Amino acid sequence: MIPVSPEVIRILKETLPATIIATIGELVAGAFLGNMTNIFRMFPGLMILVPSILDLRGCLSTALSSRLGTALHLGVIGKELGFNDELKENLIAPLINSVMLSTILGIIAYFVSSQLNVEGIGLFTFVFISLLASVMATLFQMSITVYFAFTAQEKGLDPDNVTIPALASLGDIIGIISLYIATIIIMSIGGVFIG
Amino acid sequence: MLSIISGSVLDHAEEIILAIPAFLLAIPAFANQAGDLAAVFFAKFTTELRTGTIERALSTSSTLKANLIGIILTACIGFTFLSGAISLISIVAGIPSLEPFKQWFIIFTSGVTTVILLIIIGMPVAIISSRKGLDPDNFMSPILTTLGDVIGMLLLVGLIILI
């Protein structure tokens, strides 16, 4: 018999609903991934990038949400202040990180894939897809994060409590859609067979 | 970089996963749930470490036991919900999936085992870093998230292949 103390009940009551809601959000992201079976067949090895791009997305967006929350609390950014220097600095850092890290990820994924696949996609294709997907996802997510943060503040809510959970699942959906768009773009320029 | 390893695991089992698209559906939810639940456990554990002695944090009469049972029960219910949701979506959308009990067994076993393994691996990391005066909150979350991806994918794919 498992001992179920009031403490255990409290943990279940607090953690389970958030877990279920996050799971539902992630299933939507999974639905987009499920629709990409033909893409994965066309781009052997591309699946290696999926967890990396989603994790990179998660790390950068959590950091941005946290920084925006702090900046809003300090009053150095806000809707009335517009696109000021402080806001620009907060947005440029994740974009630069995204460019650098996604390029490195693409290169590593290529070398790992070449160890696993006899005929995988080329280095250029890996790097291009990783870079393009990551930059697109970063730009989409930054816009939504700023909107959420400013709206939360306007409505008297604490942006720190709202932006991170609200954007957790959305980030995965944005990441997968960006990956899909990046592969469509490279298909249209015949990139699969470029080295 | 650790997440490249989990991606390689996925890629290695690509043909199997693409043959059962329902599992593609499960991947983001599965990977995140394991890491998030372990992170919740350690958020509470590191609070105990900071507010009391390490010995008190490890004492079975403390909140550690309640945290452990609470998180594992949440994992049991959470992964069962995930499996049920995938079965329902598969039926509605006409996506090929495994037989419901097999699917539940694979997702439940690999998911709950991943959470337990993350807790076992993370405990010495949290305790040693706390003893050395480091703040475990600074690095536990990204480590747990990516380790959760790697271990989770290995177990999930391993069970899919075995069963």
Image (cartoon, coloured by chain):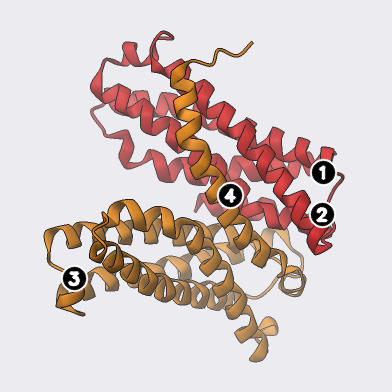
Chain that is coloured red in the picture:
B
Q: Chain of mark 3?
A: A
Type of amino acid at the residue the image marks with label 2: Ile
Which residue lies under the disc numbered 3?
Answer: A78
State which tag comes first along the sequence, 1 or 2: 2
Task: Please report whichever mark, 4 or 3, sits nearer to the chain's N-terminal start.
Answer: 4
Q: Which is in the foreground here, disc 3 or disc 1?
A: 3
The residue wearing badge 2 is: B16
| Residue in the foreground of this view, choosing between B118 and A158 | A158
A91 lies above or below B64:
below
- Write the residue at 75% across / 56% down: B89
Q: Quadrant of the C terminus of chain A?
A: bottom right
Mark 1 vs mark 2, CA separation in Å: 8 Å
Q: Is residue B147 visible?
A: no
Identity of the residue furthest to the left in this view: A75
Q: Residue at x 43, y 75 (%)?
A: A140
- What x and y, as percent, mark residue B80? 69, 38
Circles 1 and 2 in contact, beta carbons < 8 Å:
yes
Q: Gap between marks 3 and 1, in whole Å? A: 52 Å
Residue identified by numbered label 4: A23
Gap in Å between the C-alphas at discs 1 and 4? 24 Å
Amino acid at circle 4: Thr
